[in-house]
């Protein structure tokens, strides 16, 4: 008796279309993250009580490892984005301005579903002063329950999620910038 895998591998030429179908089905989780859902509330959410931020440890394009647990005592802005997301790319300049104007705030860009090669190609076209962290298998995006892209979580100095923004935002302007800086001030 053939196992399901053996049957698939020994199938007639029509198996190519089955393989394509399976590849498309495998891509559905990525599409679920990048296509906005009407059920997902957009805009700024202030979390009360503030939940602990999930673990986050990713490697940047330059090989440096970024570990959220090492950032205790500091405000960290974690932006989940993708090179294929127009709104994500549109908010990059505002995130970059926040990072440059306020070095006391760490800004990290987690590229959900993007390979390191894809992120590197993107980084050649857009200069940002914060680390771009590929998350090709979307482990981080899944652990952080990212429903759509972009999503930005602001982590307080105690390692808790204080704010969540769903959708594109102007992080370098009031009121968002002021709310981030209020977390820095304590």
Image: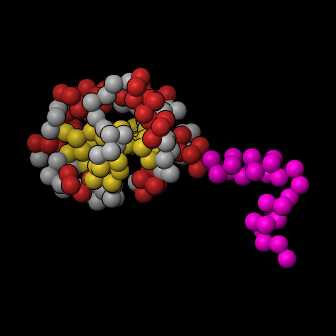
Residue 46 shown left or right of residue 181 in the figure: right
Above-or-below relation of 68 to 148: below
Q: Quadrant of residue 44?
A: top left
Q: Position of residue 170 (x, y in %)?
A: 32, 27
In the foreground, 99 or 145: 99
Write the residue at 33% across / 59% down: 55
Residue 13 shown left or right of residue 138 in the figure: right
Q: Residue furthest left?
A: 185
Q: Which residues are magenta?
A: 1-28
In the foreground, 47 or 146: 146
Q: Quadrant of residue 108?
A: top left
Q: Quadrant of residue 154?
A: top left
Q: Position of residue 71 (x, y in %)?
A: 20, 51
Write the residue at 47% across / 37% down: 117
Residue 53 shown left or right of residue 124 in the figure: left
In the foreground, 52 or 1: 1
């Amino acid at each position: 008796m053939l196992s399901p895998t053996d049957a698939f591998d020994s199938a007639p030429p029509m198996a190519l279309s089955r393989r394509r179908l399976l590849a498309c089905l495998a891509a559905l989780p990525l599409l679920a993250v990048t296509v906005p859902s009407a059920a997902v509330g957009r805009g700024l959410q202030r979390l009360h009580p503030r939940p602990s931020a999930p673990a986050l440890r990713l490697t940047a394009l330059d090989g440096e490892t970024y570990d959220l647990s090492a950032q205790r005592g500091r405000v960290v802005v974690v932006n989940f984005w993708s090179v294929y997301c127009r709104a994500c790319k549109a908010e990059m300049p505002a995130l970059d301005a926040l990072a440059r104007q306020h070095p006391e705030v760490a800004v990290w860009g987690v590229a959900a579903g993007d390979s390191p090669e894809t992120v590197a190609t993107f980084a050649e076209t857009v200069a940002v002063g914060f680390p771009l962290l590929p998350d090709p298998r979307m482990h981080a995006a899944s652990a952080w329950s990212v429903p759509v892209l972009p999503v930005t979580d602001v982590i307080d100095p105690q390692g808790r999620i204080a704010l969540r923004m769903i959708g594109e935002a102007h992080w370098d302007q009031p009121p968002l910038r002021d709310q981030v800086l209020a977390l820095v001030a304590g």
